[in-house]
Image (cartoon, rainbow, N blue to C red):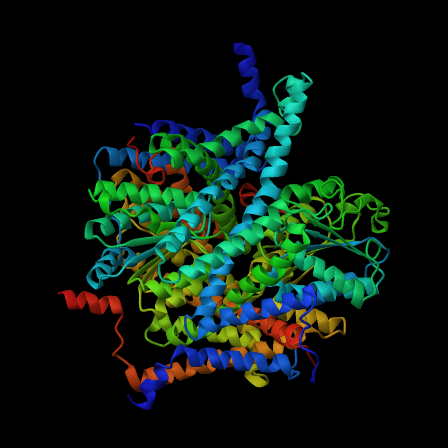
Amino acid sequence: MIFNLIAPFNTPEGLGIWIAAFLTLCIFSFLYKDNPFYKFAEHLFVGVSTGYYISIYYWNTLKPNLIDELRKGFSALGEGNVQKAFGLDENGSIIAEPHLRMVVPLMLGIFIFLIFISRKNAWLSRISFAWYIGVASGIAIPASMATRVLIQAQGSVRDFCIFNAGCANAAGLDPQTATTSLWINSALLLIGTLCAVAYFFFSLPSKGVLKAMNKVGIYFLMISFGASFGYTVMARISLLIGRFQFLFYDWLGINI
Amino acid sequence: MSNRGPLAVAFIAGMLMIGDYFLDWGPLNSYAEWVQKYYIIIAAFAIVLGVASLFKLHLGKLKRKEDGWRYSIVTFFGFFAMIVTGLFMTSGDLTGTKHPWNAWLYTNVQLPLGATMFSLLAFFIASAAYRAFRARSLEATLLLLAACLVMLGQVPILTGGVFESLPEIKQWILDIPNMASKRAIMIGVGLGMMSTALKIIFGIERTYLGGSEE
Amino acid sequence: MIFNFLNLIFQIQIKEGKGPVFLVLVLFICALVFFLDKARKGASFKIRKIAGLDAVNEAIGRATEMGKSILYTTGLETASHIATIASLTILSRVAKRAARYGTRLQVPSFDPIVMTLSQEIVRESYLEEGMIDSFRKDDIFYLTQEQFAYTAAVEGVLIREKPATVFLMGYFYAESLLLAETGNSIGAIQIAGTDAVTQLPFFIVSCDYTLIGEELYAASAYLSEDSSIISSLKAQDFGKALLWIFLFIGSIFTFFGSVKFLSIIGGSS
Amino acid sequence: MNIWQKLSSIDRRWVFLAMALFVAFPVLKPLGLPVTTTKEVEDIHSFIENLDGTKPIILGLDFGPSTAPELTPMAKALIRHSLSKGIPVLGVSLAPDAPGVANDIMKWAESELNAVMGKDIAYLGYKVGTLNVILQMGQGISKPFPKDYYGNNTDDLPIMEGVETLEDCAMVVGLEATAISDLWIQYAGDQMGVPIGIGMTAVSAPEAYVFYQSGQIVGLMGGMKGAAEYELLVNAPGAAVQGMDAQSLGHIVILVFIILGNLGYFFGTKGQEISRLKSLRDGEK
């Protein structure tokens, strides 16, 4: 282990490392207890990140998608090319950049400020929110059906194909891998899934078979939570290692 | 009944997206794609509401000289440093987050703060494991055992003999019981999400719109 | 004109491979409408106990007794995430209780739209309880949209204000454990609910009650005390029952090598 | 309070301290604990090993600083491997917080591996629209990325010679912190037929495992362990291999505390612990 120079103070990079190291230690100090250093870092973080997101929103969303589009739209309008100004072809289909169509999101954007000015206009801001949430819900309905419900169910059923050569080929599975232990595992997987689904029945009285399944379902859930917890430990320690590597190598300049 | 307008809007917006998902019809698809792409502009505008709230909070603290009002100055300092370098300064072609000063602030202030907060999880996951993983009941014991076996399977701490099969045991727990309950949770979440979203579109669930008074 | 219209109708086709999803969705909507209709006609539905839900009122009561505040976070997603909407519905119920008891309710927000919606919802709840004068709009405040800056600030609030009760409802990412452990260290009663599968274990170990996945949505329906909303739980159960049968029978079919069944469900490669 | 009760209620700050010491120590002084390689990682390695020609590899650098400790070593080991085979690497980012980290990796490759920017390696920067970007890249890589991160015309870069679309690339290796991997697999892989390799954070890796099993991806690297394995496969142990020592000790600390807690629970406080809420409920009645 060789101790090199601590990061130099007088270059922008070096100064940056010093500041980063100081802030790193400020946050770590929270582990002992709340203190002025943590408070300082916390408040700085809130301010800096809010500012950062504003500039991201401006450069990545507002400027290219709204301001530039509107500018192009108006210049096309100035040339008298109305269709081009709205980015439509003669049938009204969308062909190109939206240009002046961006007036619609602009309006919706402006609506949400109205709640600010007067409660009388609050219903206009609600139109924006309703649009925003309506679009999100519309996307979510088929998507959650397809990716969460059906794919999971399909995957579960498909697992059993492996025990039949014809079906396995159709499903793109290798029937050679079907062994007794896989048989047991697949059965266990199915039972586990069925029992855990049974845990989420809300309107049926928990009696008899359902109650027993409920119980097994909870066991499966608990094993799964324990497993994910244990599995995540590694990722979290990785992050800590990352910080230590920064402090030791980049800041203190320790070479190993 | 001023919520009728917004509810109609939510319905139309939702149906548009559902239609786009299922139907193969050029005009509908292209409009839906456009809507999807640009409705984030509403979010970009909304950040102004957020900033206004943040200013109000901290200006209030400054004005009333509340406990810790000095920290509000720190927040403003960070905010304006990022805004000035990110929005108003240009260096050649480089603007925004590519501006060297803004990038410097990002790399040396925001990034280490975020990474260190994230790394606190290593400590908290340890303290949570210590406190919660006690064999109090059958459920708790299963939780505890699964966690320990998976941890042992992750890193080569115990080797030789029986312990050689720990990685396999870990993989089995992840592949079979873990997969089973994940599937069940996903199916449940999917149904819950879908029915909530349907209630929103059909206007049955309207709490999110708040009051309807003028 | 009519001809044009018909022509248009026949041009529109269901996208390839979306057929099954469409059918199931239609089936689900039918179930939803059926149970909704029953609810409108006055049928009431029995819902099983959800542990975390019974605790909500007690937890609010505890904060009141101790003279401390309640902290409610709607998660780290925007309003476009359905879990956030479910959380907002629960917030509206919590706010009503808090208003009735005169307990302070703080809502640090991650997303400005969610903040605005929260303000409106809480305001409405106070209004309904006739407590509009004690509504403090500034207690529902925006922090930042950066994940860990938000977490740092909420931890600050937790450790300084020491709320007696903490609600963590909505979608969460890795910060779940940071929030829940800090809340635990100040001795707050914590009720969490999320549909983020990866974060559930952390809430389970650090919170007093956790609404698991679908329970979050069920809770938002249940707490609405509106029978037409609760009826949707019945439709969800119907969906699960169908799936249950599908899983069971489907597995038998594929086990015996029904390639046809496999292709119907779109599982063949 | 007897010793058992003390064991079951150690102040969490002692846990923190133990964690800090035992994770910091191996970072300063590596212990050299063994790391075994797995088939998922070996598969990516041998796929690249068996590539011929000079078609570039697309490296999806879709991760920000928070997951960099896990994914950066993967990127470095992969770049080291493919450059040693004479295969150029073309970096792209579909996650907004990625460019900073990605730029650091490119600079590292320039100085450590003497790679020529624009010829051996190139970085096209970040573009919004994830799926759209992938689909557009299928029509032409320079369509979504007309200029590279450093402002050069993408089509003028020597690395782009004979490379028009995604399909002209040898493979895509996506290093992912989020679900972007699914898009690479479904669209670049399944639809366009480009071989896909995936490196993911330890948390998300199990979700991608099904794609490996189904053969939709060539191989899979999960977390720091996966990165360490790849470092060993290319004979360049680095940050990840070192990190694995700290991982082992960190896991031991947690396991030891769990054991202590349970010892304390069984011999000390057993039966006395009641949930706070329940005791409150009893108190009310």
Residue occupying the point 42% across, 78% down: D13
The number of discs equals: 0
Residue occupying the point 15% across, 65% down: D284
Quadrant holding the N terminus of chain D: bottom left
Q: Nearer the viewer, residue B109 or D41?
A: B109
What percent of the width, then of the height, locates residue C106? 33, 54
Q: Is residue D198 left or right of residue C85?
A: right
Residue lying farthest to the left in this orientation: D285
* Above or below, D181 relative to D155: below
* Above or below, A51 relative to D223: above
What percent of the width, then of the height, locates residue B49? 44, 42
Quadrant holding the C terminus of chain D: bottom left
Q: Nearer the viewer, residue A57 or D105?
A: A57
What percent of the width, then of the height, locates residue C128? 22, 40
Q: Is residue D52 left or right of residue D200?
A: right
Q: Nearer the viewer, residue C252 or A17?
A: A17
Residue occupying the point 59% across, 85% down: B160
Answer yes or no: is residue C148 visible.
no
Answer yes or no: is residue B22 visible.
yes
Residue occupying the point 35% across, 68% down: C184
Question: Could you say which quadrant of the image residue D271 lies in?
Answer: bottom left
Q: Is residue B105 left or right of residue A229?
A: right
What percent of the width, then of the height, locates residue B88? 62, 45
